[in-house]
Image (tube, rainbow, N blue to C red):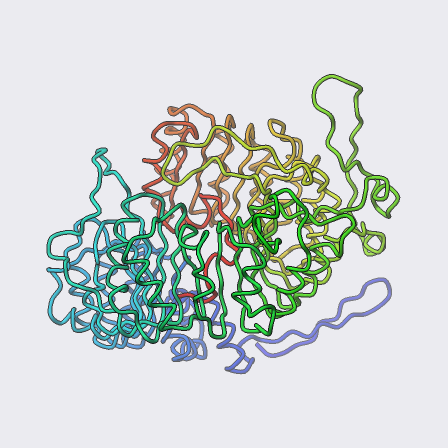
Amino acid sequence: MSNCTAEVQSGGETARFFTINPTELSDEILLHILSYVPSTDLILNVKKTCRKFAGLCLDKSLTQRVNLHKVYQVKDEEVKQMLKEIGKEICELDISGCYWLSSPTVDLITRCRRLVRLDMSGCSLTSLRLSHLLSNLVNLRSLAIDVSSGFDSGQLSSECKATLSRLRELKQTLFSPSYGVVPCCTSLEKLLLFFEVLDRTREGMLMSGQLMVGESNIPHYQNLRLFYARLAPGYINEEVVRLYLAVLSDRTPENLRAFLISVPGILPESRATINLLHSMAKNVALEAFQLPKSWLNGTSLLQQMNFSNPSYFSFSRCMISGGQLTQRIINGGKDCKSLVSLNVRGCPFFFSSDIPLRKPEDDIDITILKTLITACPNLAHLNFSSAHHHSSESKGKHLCEILAKLQHLRSLSLPVCSIADTVTTTEKSNSPGASYSSNPAPLGFGKKVRIGVQTYPRTQNDQDNAPTSVFWRLLKQLSLLEHLELIGSNFYSVMPRNDPAIRNTYPPCKRSHSVGDAELAAVSQVVFLQSLTLAQLPGILLGSSLVSIGMKCQQLRSLSLANLGMMGKVVYISSLCEMLKHCRHLRDFRLEQPYFSANSQFFQALRHCSSLQRVCIVSRNGRFEADAVMSFVSECLELIMCHMFTGETLTACRSLQQSIIQRFQPERPALNVVIFPLLHESLADVIRDVPLMHLDEITLFKSRVAEEPPKLW
């Protein structure tokens, strides 16, 4: 087929359209386009279309790096065939999260003799299978694996241990108390540890934090540049991480540049950890830093630590003041252009020069933020959520006005109360586009209040008259923002990690009531937004702002909504359904709302999200229509995860779950379905079987902005 020109007549005018055969594009352009196609499709389908594509699909730029992460539609036979055809060319292979691949398929990775980097996180792997695999991969330098119950390092062959001794990078997820393969890795420069050990077995027996017999070998950390540990809740994880840290305390690596420990609760200090921190203060200068809050609160440790061109700081949940940060971390507000990511989530005193002088509900000291922004102009990821940050009505600029200066910002997490305008209700009523009530309707008996649909700009002319709130002006300046979170400072999800569901909820901050649909519609300005989280916004009434966001934010891939509007009443369902009709590129959708009815109207709207892969609904006292769910799963062909935790009976939940699995599992091997009563006492036991990738990324609610350093792995 050759190039051609088509003419179309409309209204007396003729328009010409030039078409081109894709095969006539340059090789460079075609290779770039093909790099977005999954490797299995390239080798098994595209390669067979014509002679030119047959050659291009075997280009080294496409065959040396194979990434099947989140390619949920790939099947065992397809992966086997691909490995047989191009296995000898592959240098980097990522099958992380491919939990559905069978062991015989994983065994074929031995064909990839040139492998330098291999990520098998989330894949089932025994110690014997790992030994056989690594014995054939002598060039391997980077490895990511899971260590499950029954793992025995004594079963590793000498050839396998030789490969491990040459590794430079290791990511290890522990589901059982173990050193895993760490003692065999004598040349590590980067070590990432994820502790996912449960306190009890399935039979209810208490687990022990003691390592298994034969695993008393000492890890080698002398070459480490990065040490990262993330703990799931539970005392067993705390016991095991102390064993890893004990070795570090004996001799701190001289080249250590990143030291990060993420703990959900309190990790008490030990003599070994105290020695470790003192040794680090004397011998290393860090670029990335995170410690458990109990190690920092009330200590002078920050004053002793040394930092060199820092790029990442996390003080999540720490009782640190802004004065401590500016004086001790960024050199009194001097140049700190290297810092790109900062997490001060849950730090109620961050905008205060001194902790004892401020109450959490007091107005913030805006000079702290000014100092931070001036010293760190290149911040790209910033998390201020889970705390009350109230701008003053009379002192200085609003928090949003200062944040607008961060032109490099790509991800931002704020408490809802922090974006509330500081003008009085009278002033707001006189401003353009403010024909709405900023206060919720009174509860109980009394004079009826008529509540209308809150306005938001629909056209360019309307946008010129858009509300002049500081939040509108902030997002207008941050037009390249990709990830945004607005989370109520008192919000807690009813879905905990290893415990029964939370029955009680905390009232939202009073200031957050003034953030309604008119303010939230400002999000529609961020046309490149990929991920949006909205939680605990009591000022949302009919949800008209959701429609605006759905229409304008066409790049949206992930959407998480929780506790919008008044508790107990879901009045925004019509707007949500209208919004979903525009979200054709949405892949992940999470909704947490009490008394939500997942009916046919909702699922008919959700069908328009043709790219949807994962959906999670959490609703205390909520209901679902089984036929509507089945019809939705049938028509949403990309869907591979369906989690629903509602107020339905155990019998109804099990029946629907079994029906979905029996009907769709054969054609969707990656399908993961969990439908269970939210308040059932066995919820924690059910959750433990969910693949960690789904559990961590969507099922459990959490703030993800600046959660870890960029490009950690």
Q: Can residue 73 be seen here?
A: no
Q: Quadrant of residue 229?
A: bottom left
Q: Can residue 713 be seen here?
A: yes
71 is higher (above) or lower (below) than 617: below
Quadrant assignment for the N terminus:
bottom right
| Residue 135 placement (x, y as % from top left) | 16, 70
Identify the residue at image location x=54%, y=60%: 324
Identify the residue at image location x=31%, y=58%: 273
Tag count in the figure?
0
Quadrant assignment for the C terminus:
bottom left
The one nearer the camera, 293 or 671, is: 293
Is 372 on the left-hand or right-hand side of 99?
A: right
The one nearer the camera, 654 or 515, is: 515
| Residue 381 placement (x, y as % from top left) | 56, 62
Q: Which residue of the protein is positioned furthest toward the right in this rendering? A: 430
Is 547 on the left-hand or right-hand side of 675?
A: right
Q: Which residue of the protein is positioned furthest toward the top in this rendering? A: 445
Q: Quadrant of residue 557?
A: bottom right
| Residue 321 placement (x, y as % from top left) | 56, 55
